[in-house]
Image (tube, grey):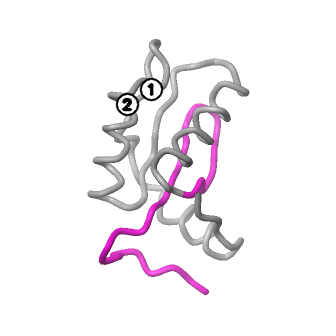
Amino acid sequence: MKSLTPAQRQHLKGLAHGLQPVVMIGSHGLTPAVLKEVERSLAAHELIKIKAASDEVDTRRAWLDEICSATGAAAVQQIGKVLVIYRAADKPVIALPK
């Protein structure tokens, strides 16, 4: 899992503000199908929002950690039931500050 500097995280938060969630984690939790969809979405967009159905804060935090370790993405932020993650593409479209 890649870590981001505070400046990079702030930049990505700004970019993510207008995004809609592209992946939903439903009542069955973090399934292999959900991870596959996260992987596909990251490859297409670099920065994505994920909507988590669980009411448990600890469960959502665990899902965020698991998604990041499984995909090599970095956690940008978690606001309520929305998780934001980032992974640079082979040819990055998003330019991160140093």
Q: Is residue 60 left or right of residue 90?
A: right
Mark-to-mark CA distance, 2 and 1: 7 Å
The quarter in which the N terminus is drawn is bottom right
As drawn, the residue found furthest toward the top would be 27
The correct choice, above or below, for 84 with respect to 2 in the image is: above
Residue sitting nearer the eye, 95 or 37: 37
Query: Residue 47 in the image: x percent, y percent?
Result: 42, 58
Count neighbours of disc 2 (C-alpha within 10 A) and say few if under 14, some if 14 to 19, many if 20 or more: some
Residue drawn where x is 42% and y is 51% of the image? 48
Q: Is residue 46 magenta?
A: no
Query: Residue 41 in the image: x percent, y percent?
Result: 31, 49
Residue drawn where x is 63% and y is 67% of the image? 9
Q: Earlier in the sequence, mark 2 or mark 1?
A: 1
Question: Which residue lies under the disc numbered 2?
Answer: 34
Q: Is residue 79 magenta?
A: yes
Residue sitting nearer the eye, 67 or 14: 67
The secondary structure type at the circle numbered 2 is helix
Magenta residues (range): 74-98
Residue drawn where x is 54% and y is 66% of the image? 12
The kind of residue tagged 1 is Ile
Question: Which residue lies under the disc numbered 1?
Answer: 25
Count neighbours of disc 1 (C-alpha within 10 A) and say few if under 14, some if 14 to 19, many if 20 or more: many
